[in-house]
Image: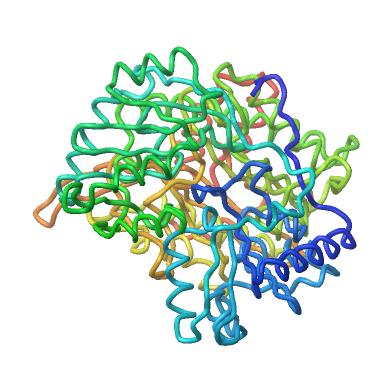
C-alpha cells in the first residue's frame, strides 16, 4: 500500500431492503440444494480475524460490519452471534433486517451448536462452506447434532451462487523480509519448528494460519486488509518444507530466498491434490500428521480424518513467533517511540482544535493516520482507526465514515484507538481524550480505568503465570464499582504482522477453546481496560507492554512488564484522590518518562503543553 495514501476499505453495508432480498435469495438457493439451515462465519480459508472483501459473505448477507460474527439462516428465521465488543453496533446494523441478534456469553443466550440442536429436526441438513469453518467448530457441530442424525453438507459455497458481483480473490505481491529485521533465517526457524515436531513425535506438520506462515518463511504480503499476509499453506516433514502460494504473487526475490532455504514452492490451489498424493501410501508409511484444529478448516480436517493417523494440538509456530528475538525487540522499541510521538502530537492538535474549528470523528481519524504516514517506516494502519465521540465510543470497534461521523465540540470525550504497520513493528494504542467538562461520575470511571491499566503494568509475578492470573489487576478497580467490560484485557501483538496475536492473552474467563500461554520474556501484550455504557460514552486506556525477567529469588524467577507505549494519559479525567498511592506514583513516574522521551521531538508549543499534560498529581 502506498504510504502516502490510506484507502477506504470496501463495505457491503447497504439498504435493509437489499439485505432482506439477499436473505430471500439465499433461502431459495438452500431449498434447491436441499439444505435446511445454512451457516456463514466471518472467515477466510485460514480463520483470519480480518478478511478480504472476497470473504465478507456474512457482511454481504447481514449488513453487520463487525470483524466477528456468525450468521445462521433457515427458511423461517435468521440469527447473528457476536461478542460483547459489538453488541451495540450489531443491534443498530441488524435493525429491520429480520435477523435476530444473539449476544454471546450472555445469560440465557444459546451458543450456535445448542441453538441448532434445539431447532433442527431429526435428519435435516446443515450446510456451510467447509473451507471457512474451523475443524474445531465443525467437530462441535458434529457432536451437538449427532443425536438428531443431522447431515452436514460442507462442500458448497451457496453464497457464491447469489453474489453476482463478488470481489476478486485476494492476491498481492510476496515480499521477503531481510534477516536483519527479524534476527533468524528461514532455515533457523524451520530447525526450531522441527525440534518441536520431534517432541510431538510428528512426522509432518500442516500449517494454515497466515501470520504463522509469514513468520516462518520471512514473507509478507497484502492479501488481507491491515494484516501483511499472503494466502498460503505450509507443509513440513523432517526433511522437506513446502509453501503453497499463488503464482501471481511470486517475485524473483521470493523464489531465490525460498530456494536458498530449501523450501519448495507449490501453487496455492494445489494443496488438496498434494495432500491426497501425500496420504496415498497410507498412514503406516507416512507417520503422524500434526495440525492445529483452531485454524485448520473443516474441509481439511475431513481430509485428514480420512487419512487417519493425525494428532491435534497448538501450533508450535505460534508459540515460537510470540517470543520476539532481540533483533525484533530492538526495532519494536524504536518504532513504538516514533508511533508514540505521532499519537502525542495528535492529542495536542485535538485539544487545540476541537470546538474551535469544524471537526468530525472522521477528520480526527484521518489526521492521526496522516501523522503516522509521516514516519519513514510507515507501511499501513494495523486496523481501521477508531475515532469515537461521546456515545459512539460505547461501540468498542466503531468506525466513522466521511458521510456518517459525529461533529466534535469542546465537551465530552473522544476515544481514539489506532495503530500502524511499520518496517520494524506493529503498534496498537488507545487514549480517551477529554475535550471539555465531564461529570464527576465519568471522572471516577476514567480514573478507575487508568488505575487498572497502571496496576497491571506495574505487576511483578512468578514465571509460569498466564494472563488469567493477572487479569484481576486491571479489572479489579472496575469490579469494585460493580462494572465490567465485555472483552479481554490484553492480547499479543505481531511483529510487522497481525495486531492481534496469540497464544498469550490477558482475560479473566476460563474458556475451553481459548488457549492460554505462560507469559515469557520477549512476548508483548496489550493492557487495555475500559468502560462502555450504551448511548452514553466509552473509555479505554491502552498501553503495549513487553514481558521481561525481573529477578530470581529462592522462590523462583520473577517477571515484570516494561512499557513500549509513551503517550500521556489525559489528567483532565483523573481524580488523584481516588487513585491509590502506588498507582498515583506510577502515573507520575510514567509521565516523567513520557516527557523525557517525547519532548525532544516536539515543537516549542507542543513541548510546553506536554509539560503541563504530564505534571505530577
The residue shown at (53%, 26%) is 422
In the figure, residue 190 lies in which quadrant?
Answer: top left
Q: Position of residue 407 (x, y in %)?
A: 87, 46
The residue shown at (68%, 57%) is 58
Q: Position of residue 368 (x, y in %)?
A: 70, 32
In the figure, residue 61 lies in which quadrant?
Answer: bottom right
Where does the N terminus fall, quadrant-wise?
top right
Q: Horizontal placement of 236 versus 501: left or right?
A: left
In the figure, residue 402 lies in which quadrant?
Answer: top right
The residue shown at (80%, 40%) is 362
Q: Position of residue 517 (x, y in %)?
A: 31, 55
Q: Residue furthest front?
A: 281
Camera-side residue: 108 or 157? 157
Camera-side residue: 358 or 232? 232
Camera-side residue: 397 or 27? 27
Residue 582 in view: no
Q: Horizontal placement of 212 versus 187: left or right?
A: right
Amino acid at each position: 500500500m502506498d504510504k502516502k495514501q490510506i484507502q477506504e476499505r470496501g463495505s457491503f453495508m447497504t439498504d435493509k431492503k437489499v439485505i432482506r432480498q439477499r436473505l430471500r435469495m439465499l433461502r431459495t438457493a438452500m431449498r434447491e440444494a436441499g439444505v435446511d439451515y445454512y451457516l456463514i462465519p466471518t472467515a477466510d480459508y485460514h480463520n483470519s480475524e480480518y478478511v478480504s472483501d472476497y470473504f465478507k459473505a456474512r457482511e454481504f448477507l447481514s449488513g453487520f460490519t463487525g470483524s466477528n460474527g456468525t450468521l445462521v439462516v433457515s427458511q423461517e428465521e435468521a440469527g447473528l452471534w457476536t461478542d460483547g465488543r459489538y453488541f451495540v453496533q450489531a443491534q443498530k446494523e441488524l435493525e429491520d433486517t429480520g435477523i435476530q441478534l444473539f449476544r454471546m456469553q450472555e445469560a440465557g443466550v444459546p451458543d450456535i451448536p445448542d441453538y441448532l440442536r434445539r431447532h433442527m429436526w431429526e435428519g435435516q441438513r446443515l450446510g456451510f462452506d467447509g473451507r471457512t469453518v474451523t475443524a474445531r467448530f465443525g467437530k462441535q457441530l458434529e457432536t451437538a447434532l449427532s443425536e438428531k442424525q443431522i447431515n452436514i453438507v460442507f462442500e458448497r459455497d451457496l453464497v457464491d451462487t447469489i453474489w453476482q458481483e463478488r470481489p476478486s480473490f485476494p492476491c498481492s505481491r510476496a515480499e521477503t523480509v531481510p534477516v536483519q529485521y527479524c534476527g533468524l533465517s528461514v532455515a533457523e526457524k524451520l530447525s526450531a519448528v522441527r525440534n518441536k515436531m520431534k517432541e510431538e513425535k510428528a512426522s509432518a506438520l500442516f500449517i494454515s494460519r497466515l501470520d504463522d506462515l509469514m513468520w516462518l518463511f520471512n514473507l509478507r504480503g497484502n492479501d488481507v486488509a491491515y494484516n501483511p499476509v499472503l494466502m498460503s499453506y505450509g507443509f513440513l516433514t523432517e526433511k522437506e518444507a513446502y509453501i503453497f502460494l499463488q503464482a501471481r504473487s511470486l517475485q524473483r526475490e521470493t523464489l531465490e530466498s525460498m530456494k536458498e532455504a530449501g523450501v519448495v514452492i507449490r501453487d496455492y490451489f494445489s494443496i488438496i491434490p498434494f495432500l491426497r498424493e501425500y496420504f496415498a501410501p497410507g498412514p503406516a508409511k507416512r507417520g503422524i500428521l500434526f495440525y492445529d484444529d483452531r485454524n485448520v478448516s473443516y474441509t481439511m480436517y475431513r481430509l485428514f480424518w480420512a487419512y487417519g493417523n493425525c494428532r491435534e494440538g497448538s501450533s508450535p509456530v505460534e508459540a515460537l513467533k510470540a517470543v520476539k528475538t532481540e533483533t525484533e525487540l530492538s526495532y519494536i522499541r524504536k518504532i513504538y517511540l516514533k508511533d508514540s510521538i505521532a499519537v502525542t502530537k495528535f492529542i495536542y492538535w485535538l485539544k487545540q482544535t476541537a470546538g474551535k474549528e469544524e471537526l468530525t470523528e472522521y477528520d480526527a481519524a484521518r489526521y492521526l493516520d496522516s501523522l503516522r504516514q509521516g514516519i519513514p517506516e510507515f507501511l499501513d494502519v494495523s486496523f481501521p482507526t477508531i475515532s469515537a465521540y461521546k456515545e459512539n465510543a460505547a461501540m468498542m470497534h466503531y468506525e466513522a465514515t466521511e458521510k456518517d461521523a459525529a461533529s466534535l465540540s469542546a465537551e465530552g470525550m473522544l476515544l481514539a484507538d489506532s495503530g500502524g504497520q511499520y518496517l520494524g513493528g506493529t503498534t496498537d494504542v488507545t487514549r480517551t481524550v477529554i475535550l471539555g467538562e465531564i461529570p464527576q461520575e465519568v471522572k471516577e470511571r476514567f480514573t478507575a480505568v487508568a488505575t487498572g491499566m497502571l496496576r497491571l503494568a506495574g505487576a511483578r509475578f512468578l514465571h509460569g503465570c498466564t494472563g488469567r492470573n493477572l487479569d484481576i489487576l486491571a479489572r479489579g478497580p472496575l469490579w469494585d464499582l460493580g462494572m465490567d467490560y465485555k472483552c479481554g484485557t490484553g492480547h499479543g501483538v505481531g511483529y510487522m504482522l497481525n495486531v492481534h496475536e496469540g497464544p498469550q492473552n490477558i482475560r479473566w474467563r476460563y474458556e475451553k477453546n481459548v488457549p492460554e500461554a505462560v507469559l515469557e520474556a520477549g512476548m508483548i501484550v496489550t493492557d487495555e481496560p475500559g468502560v462502555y455504557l450504551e448511548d452514553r460514552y466509552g473509555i479505554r486506556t491502552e498501553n503495549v507492554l513487553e514481558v521481561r525477567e525481573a529477578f530470581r529469588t529462592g522462590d523462583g524467577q520473577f517477571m515484570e512488564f516494561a512499557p513500549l507505549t509513551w503517550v500521556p494519559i489525559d489528567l483532565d479525567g483523573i481524580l488523584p484522590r481516588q487513585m491509590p498511592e502506588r498507582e498515583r506514583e506510577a502515573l507520575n513516574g510514567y509521565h516523567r518518562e513520557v516527557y523525557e522521551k517525547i519532548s525532544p521531538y516536539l515543537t516549542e508549543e507542543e513541548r510546553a503543553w506536554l509539560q503541563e499534560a504530564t505534571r505530577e498529581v
